[in-house]
Image (tube, rainbow, N blue to C red):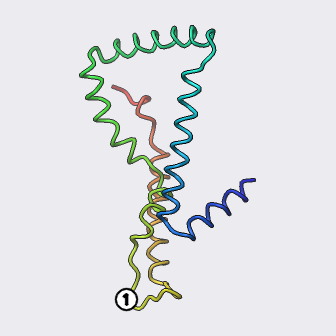
Amino acid sequence: MTIALLLVLGAIFLRGFSEAITLAVGLVAIYLALNLVLVINGTPGHRRQSRRDWHAWRASLFQQHGHPLMMTAMALLLFPKLALGLSGFETGVAVMPLVRGDSTDTEAAPAGRIRNTKKLLAHGGARDERDAARPAASSRPC
C-alpha cells in the first residue's frame, strides 16, 4: 500500500508542482472538514468527558501563563519555531523547483541542478539529525 501511495505521489509531482500543491490543499480541506464533523458530533458521554478535560486543560493553561495576552505572546513567539521545524526533506521538496543548475544544464541533462539538489537535501538531513539530538524544550531546566 505504501509503495502504491508513493507511486501516486510521484506521478502527481511529475505532472507539476502546482498540481501537487492543489491536491494537498484539497486533501487538507477534506481532513479539516472531517475533523470538524467529529468534533461537532461527538457522543454525549464523550462530550461530558471532553468538557472535564477542557476545564482541566484551561485551568492548567492559566496556571502556567496567567493571562490571555501572555498566552498569545507565547504562541506568537513559539509558532515560527514550530513552523521552521519542518524536516529538511519537506523543506527540500518545497524549494526544489527553485534550485539552480549550471549554465550548461539542459532540460534533458540537468546535472548541475541534480548536484545542487543533493547538496540541499544533505544539508537538510544533517539539520534534522542535529535537531533530533537536542533535548526537547520541555526537558530543559528553566
The outermost residue toward the bottom is 104
Q: List the residue tagged with mark 1.
A: 103
Q: Is residue 72 above or below residue 133?
A: above
In depth, the one of 92 and 130 nearer the eye is 92
Element assignment for label 1? loop
Q: Is residue 13 above or below residue 90?
A: below
Q: Position of residue 127 (x, y in %)?
A: 44, 55
Q: Position of residue 68 (x, y in %)?
A: 27, 19
Relative side of 70 to 127, left or right: left
Q: Residue at x 44, y 63 (%)?
A: 123
In depth, the one of 41 and 78 nearer the eye is 41
Q: Quadrant of the C terminus?
A: top left
Relative side of 41 to 80, left or right: right
Q: Residue at x 45, y 15 (%)?
A: 57
Q: Is residue 114 above or below residue 109?
A: above
Q: Position of residue 116 (x, y in %)?
A: 44, 75
Rendering quarter of residue 63: top left
Residue type highlighted by circle 1: Ser
Q: Residue at x 52, y 60 (%)?
A: 20
In depth, the one of 51 and 59 nearer the eye is 51
The crowd level at tag 1 (other Cα within 10 Å; few <14, some 14-19, many 20+) is few
Q: Residue at x 49, y 71 (%)?
A: 118
In depth, the one of 133 and 111 nearer the eye is 111
Rendering quarter of residue 11: bottom right
